Amino acid sequence: MKKLLNSIAMVLLISGVANAQNPKVIVENRDLRKPNMVIAKPIAFKSIALSEAKADGKQLKSTDVVKTLSGKSITVDEYLKRINTLESEMTKKGYTLRNFKPESKSLKIKPIILAPAAISSANTLNNLNLKPVATVQTRMNKIFLQNKASDAFRKISRTEIGKIAPIGPKKPAIAPVTEEQNHNIATLLKPLTDKINQMVDNDQATLEILNASLQVKSYAEAPLPSNTGDIVPSSLLNTNSEYKVAVKFNANVKGSFGLPITLTIPVATMNGEFIAPSNKDKKLSRKVIVNLMGKSLFNKTSVVNTDVLSEEEQEELDLSELLQAPAMNTNNFMDWVPSMSFNTRLSNLGSVGCMYKVDMTKTNVNAYIGPTFSARIRLSASFGYEDVLEGGIEGIATLLRGGIGFGGNAGVKKDGNEWKLVNQSYIESTLEALEAEVNFFVRYPDLTNWSCWGPCIKKETLPIFKTPVAFAMKGTLLDNDKGKVLPW
């Protein structure tokens, strides 16, 4: 078994955010699990005779009526025929109903049981150096405060735009100032996943993140001062300054969760781009394309026909649709179970959502975008044999819950007598991923006890896959301010 949280750079299902086509869950029928070292040799088949059918010491007759697993009434003679059909199949693989007791060691594939204490310890270490997460409102108040604090961010009227202040004597040209932050999200997460990888040797489930980045760019050209020697906001509109915040985030979950299948589930594709050009002849632009769990939430790519944009939206989708049901066979789990297909059902539960907020003028762009998740899958599968044996699989796996938020602020502002370049970025996470419990169960007749209108039925439940939260990331991953005083 390879790593539970492999390096987070696998081939992503979604080739690009901008042209995402609502990708679907992909189910592959292959087995990534380590086989149990079980070597079963055939044993001689000995028919279960009527003489073995005794209830409370009383010999049952072939015409007596007994109950099957489903509660159907049949004769002892018919019941023994069904039992012997099953017994014949089991003895070919070295088992018999006469002394049968299924255990984890008799599973064909070694169960995956991850210790909660070890995973919890790893996650605690992963988050030691992270600052607490600020509330969204606190963050927004902080990041959007500057629109109110400086006349460089106020609405500039059309009249003022056309009335550039008279220019005094020319001064030596001042070189443009550029500040740019480019943060690779996968790189930020890698130290967290690496610690868990050191502890767990298993690729039953992976969270893969690719092409995920945050860019905050501030490019400021110095305008010529007025005849008073001051720079007025309107003169900024005569430059080619530009301010940009852009976010990309692609992620999916891939896992088998102890099953002989691999599920690849598209979790999120997100592209947000906000550009504020100062030049009065150029327009503000914003692009917001968000697909969560293969469903489109936002698709906005238009230019903005005003010099100010303040926009906020939030959407959520309920996840309750039936997904592709994987094909499975009993031979994948227990060697002693006669070969038959499972009736399987796979569904997703919970909800996914996203909110974004942007506040733009010709001299500033502030943006926040963040998806939220409560995404799980439920798998149920069952089989029956001659109405005397039945079993199945049942489990729920939490793919993701919580969220991750990206924010950026780029522009210029006047602080007292100084002009300052604004360039701030932050990433915050309350994300938990990959928690699952999947069990195999079997109900079979106890041939030592016929007191239940036929053999009493035993049920055994065997874990296939069980893990606590394998990946927890709660805190401020990035909080960076590269603002500076401008030489104007």
Image (tube, grey):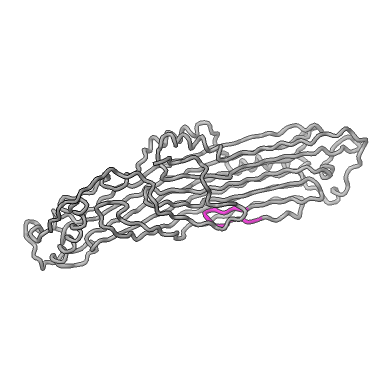
- State left or right for residue 170 relative to residue 130: right
- State left or right for residue 483 relative to residue 26: right
- State left or right for residue 406 relative to residue 42: right
User: Which residue does the image show at 38% across and 58% down from the upper left?
Assistant: 327
Residue 413's quadrant in the figure? top right
Tell me the quadrant of the picture where the C terminus can be found. Answer: top right
How far from the left and from the top, in percent, is residue 293? Answer: 52, 54
The residue nearer to you, when weighing 72 against 132, is 72
Overall secondary structure of the magenta stretch?
strand
How far from the left and from the top, in percent, is residue 450? Answer: 13, 58
How far from the left and from the top, in percent, is residue 374? Answer: 48, 50
Q: Is residue 313 visible?
A: no
- Is 309 placed above or below 195 here? below
Please tell me whether residue 291 belongs to the stretch shown in magenta. Answer: yes
Counting the numbered discs, the total is 0
How far from the left and from the top, in percent, is residue 183? Answer: 61, 38
Please tell me whether residue 395 belongs to the stretch shown in magenta. Answer: no
The residue nearer to you, when weighing 430 against 218, is 218
Q: Is residue 469 visible?
A: yes
The residue nearer to you, when weighing 8 against 460, is 8
Tell me the quadrant of the picture where the N terminus can be found. Answer: top left
Specify the segment rendered in magenta: 289-300
- State left or right for residue 264 relative to residue 270: left
User: Which residue does the image show at 72% across and 54% down from the upper left?
Assistant: 303
User: Which residue does the image show at 42% across and 43% down from the upper left?
Assistant: 203
